[in-house]
């Protein structure tokens, strides 16, 4: 069997760019300084649901408003996770586990408060009609919730009529749709047509499998998204006032 | 159909594994023999999105695809070709659609075979439509429709039958996003294997009745999901080492099809097929650099090392500068086969095999464990536990960890993160239950509550 030293054949660039610091070391520099808040943020980072609730309880007992902890502590912890994910120091399962812990924490804070918590915005997520492949949608949904959005998850294989009805009912800031197959992604166009016919101009963010930028650019409301991690960034951009043309300028990479 | 468990390797030595050669070649279609000393391209395609409007438009689309491919093959002088039609869901939901398309395709292939003598065969891969938005129902009405689809295509011109089965996917998707090795072993090694065995007994009966080939399955919905989520070197989504462990475990799942009577060639996207070939001796289809039209992977050359059919995964049918996409990719694949076949004729097949393998061996942990020598070693631990689907899955995963860790002492460079994740995966696997009974019992408790769509009765549990 032939074997050679591959140093002149391939470069494992992931090793070249790897940070000398561990994720924990970087996170330590990013956590909030207030000891109560820091404890909650660290528990979110570590994805420890029990510790999140315990730290929240501890902080609420000291007289802090429960709802203020959603943004000041839970979201702050999640922001550390998101930052490290963007740096390539954390991986998707880390984000998923932290997000679950954060969502548990949000529910706890809501239970402890008599006031209503306002999310950053409402987003509808779904998998197109005829398609049951939903791992991409699950990832997107968690990432959006982790970034403070309320997500109406319509599930998989969702009929066009149901998507349109949900948009009319919920009035989201955007839709996030995924499709794996070329034969099912046509449903994006049907959603687009039905929304336009009702004078609704909400961005329809599309991605997954065989979906391409060219295909999505072909219908008026379409915004192509190649990476699940970009979906919350698109939502943030919508809140900052970017319209569909500007969203395309920013997020269409090809 | 009875089930045959593999308790030993059909190949005595990994050095005997070679492209174009299998222990048990498969005769099929129009004078084609797979794994009998030469390789053949397997071109795969998807209709344009609006072509599935009705049966007539879809039949017409596949006729165009088939004629385009056959015409290009004879224009460039290639001696053989396999066409794979992966059903769009309308074809499986309406079994007569699939049957009419198989008939139409085969008629065109016969025309070219009669006129030019080109050896060819038609594989149809039925869509696994056993899930809808509410639930997964693996053994209900949708399953009956799948079997009806197999019946109809088998009697209408399809030479080889395949499916990309979904069994275990609901628990797998949940587990892989949480780095949960227990869930990976349960979903792939237990649930997946149970489902594969269940459906392949029926598929093999249908194939036997219709005198066609029960070809094989793939763990696409599991191992490829992990591999594609893991992505390229700079995609920090999922550990490539963990995806490699999933791949090793997936071989114990795909093997269940052959234990139930499948004879190959296994599906192209089953990167675990190197392990399957070493265990069973049956020919395999593989995809690599010729499937960049569908996705990127980190073993584009290496995937050719032991292939018998060489595939492009799938390409949407449309025009390109050099012809239609099926013509362009069919030609590319066939030129690759021409190179491999030349090496075989010249007696330097193993040298080319090694060049292909070594060029990617250290590109990624997954390429490393699927290099033919390591694939063989994983096969050995699977066959060491023929009657225990839990142990063979777990041990396959453990072996992958061991290979990657020992490889990292040589030319396989691992990042600190990969080193940490492979160590964690090994420890997680090691700490799992001692025996299958307690493992399944614990997993039923855990995943029945954690995964909404998991229904143990889908697996006879």
Image (tube, coloured by chain):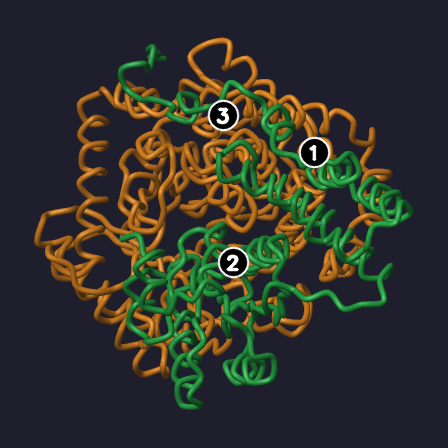
Chain colours: A green, B orange
Q: Nearer the viewer, mark 2 or mark 3?
A: 3
* Callout 2 touching callout 3 (CB < 8 Å): no
Have a look at marks 1 and 3 and say if they share a chain.
no
Q: Is residue B397 above or below residue B329?
A: above
Label 2 packing within 10 angstroms: few (<14), some (14-19), many (20+): some
Precedes in sequence: disc 2 or disc 3:
2
Protein chain holding label 3: B
On residue B369, the disc is 3
Q: Position of residue A151 (x, y in %)?
A: 62, 66
Q: Position of residue B234 (x, y in %)?
A: 41, 34
Q: Position of residue B410 (x, y in %)?
A: 46, 9
Q: Mark 1 = which residue?
A: A33
Label 1 packing within 10 angstroms: few (<14), some (14-19), many (20+): few
Protein chain holding label 2: B
Q: Mark 2 = which residue?
A: B208
Q: Residue furthest bottom?
A: A198
B151 to the left or right of B53 = right
| CA separation in Å, label 2 and label 3 | 35 Å
Protein chain holding label 1: A
- Is residue B147 among what the camera can see? no
Asked which secondary structure carries label 2, the reply is helix
- Is residue A112 among what the camera can see? yes
Residue B288, quarter of the rendered image: top left
Q: Position of residue A49 (x, y in %)?
A: 79, 44
Look at 11% across and 54% down and name the residue there.
B74
Asked which secondary structure carries label 3, the reply is helix
């Amino acid at each position: 069997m032939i074997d050679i030293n591959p140093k002149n054949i391939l470069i494992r660039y992931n090793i070249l760019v790897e940070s000398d610091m561990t994720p924990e070391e970087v996170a330590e520099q990013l956590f909030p300084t207030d000891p109560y808040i820091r404890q909650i943020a660290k528990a979110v980072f570590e994805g420890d649901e029990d510790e999140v609730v315990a730290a929240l309880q501890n902080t609420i007992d000291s007289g802090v408003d429960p709802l203020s902890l959603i943004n000041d502590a839970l979201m702050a912890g999640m922001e550390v996770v998101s930052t490290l994910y963007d740096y390539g120091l954390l991986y998707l399962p880390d984000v998923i586990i932290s997000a679950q812990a954060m969502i548990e924490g949000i529910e706890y804070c809501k239970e402890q408060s008599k006031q209503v918590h306002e999310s950053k915005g409402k987003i509808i997520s779904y998998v197109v009609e005829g398609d049951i492949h939903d791992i991409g949608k699950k990832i997107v949904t968690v990432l959006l919730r982790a970034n403070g959005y309320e997500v109406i998850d319509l599930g998989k294989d969702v009929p066009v009529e149901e998507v349109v009805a949900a948009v009319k009912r919920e009035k989201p800031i955007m839709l996030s749709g995924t499709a794996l197959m070329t034969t099912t992604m046509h449903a994006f166009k049907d959603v687009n047509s039905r929304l336009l016919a009702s004078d609704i101009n909400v961005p329809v963010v599309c991605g997954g499998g065989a979906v391409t930028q060219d295909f999505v650019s072909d219908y008026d409301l379409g915004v192509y998204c190649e990476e699940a991690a970009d979906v919350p960034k698109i939502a943030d951009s919508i809140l900052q006032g970017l319209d569909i043309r500007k969203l395309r300028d920013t997020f269409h990479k090809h | 159909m009875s089930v045959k468990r593999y308790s030993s390797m059909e190949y005595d030595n990994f050095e005997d594994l070679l492209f174009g050669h299998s222990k048990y070649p498969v005769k099929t279609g129009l004078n084609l023999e797979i794994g009998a000393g030469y390789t053949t391209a397997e071109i795969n395609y998807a209709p344009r999105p609006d072509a599935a409007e009705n049966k007539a438009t879809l039949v017409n689309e596949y006729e165009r695809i088939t004629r385009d491919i056959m015409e290009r093959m004879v224009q460039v002088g290639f001696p053989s070709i396999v066409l794979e039609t992966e059903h769009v869901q309308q074809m499986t939901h309406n079994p007569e659609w699939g049957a009419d398309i198989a008939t139409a395709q085969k008629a065109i292939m016969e025309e070219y075979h009669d006129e030019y003598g080109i050896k060819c065969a038609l594989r149809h891969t039925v869509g696994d439509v056993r899930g809808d938005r509410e639930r997964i129902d693996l053994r209900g009405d949708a399953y009956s429709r799948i079997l009806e689809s197999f019946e109809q295509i088998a009697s209408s011109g399809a030479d080889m039958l395949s499916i990309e089965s979904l069994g275990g996917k609901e628990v797998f998707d949940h587990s892989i996003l949480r780095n949960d090795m227990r869930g990976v072993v349960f979903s792939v090694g237990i649930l997946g294997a149970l489902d594969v065995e269940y459906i392949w007994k029926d598929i093999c009966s249908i194939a036997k009745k219709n005198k066609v080939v029960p070809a094989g399955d793939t763990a696409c919905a599991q191992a490829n999901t992990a591999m594609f989520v893991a992505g390229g070197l700079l995609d920090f989504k999922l550990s490539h080492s963990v995806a490699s462990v999933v791949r090793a475990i997936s071989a114990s799942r795909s093997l269940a099809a052959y234990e139930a009577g499948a004879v190959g060639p296994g599906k192209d996207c089953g990167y675990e097929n190197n392990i399957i070939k070493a265990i069973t001796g049956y020919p395999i289809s593989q995809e690599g650099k010729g499937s960049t039209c569908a996705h990127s992977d980190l073993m584009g050359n290496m995937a050719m090392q032991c292939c018998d059919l060489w595939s492009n995964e799938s390409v949407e049918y449309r025009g390109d500068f050099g012809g239609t996409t099926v013509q362009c990719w069919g030609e590319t694949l066939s030129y690759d086969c021409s190179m491999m076949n030349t090496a075989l004729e010249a007696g330097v097949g193993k040298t080319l095999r090694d060049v292909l393998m070594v060029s990617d061996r250290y590109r990624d942990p997954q390429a490393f464990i699927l290099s033919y020598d390591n694939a063989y070693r994983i096969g050995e631990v699977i066959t060491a536990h023929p009657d225990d689907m839990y142990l063979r899955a777990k041990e396959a995963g453990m072996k992958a960890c061991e290979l990657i860790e020992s490889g990292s002492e040589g030319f396989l460079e691992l990042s600190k993160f990969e080193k940490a994740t492979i160590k964690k995966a090994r420890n997680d696997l090691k700490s799992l239950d001692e025996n299958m009974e307690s493992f399944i019992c614990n997993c039923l408790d855990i995943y029945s509550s954690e995964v909404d769509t998991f229904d143990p009765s889908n697996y006879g549990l």
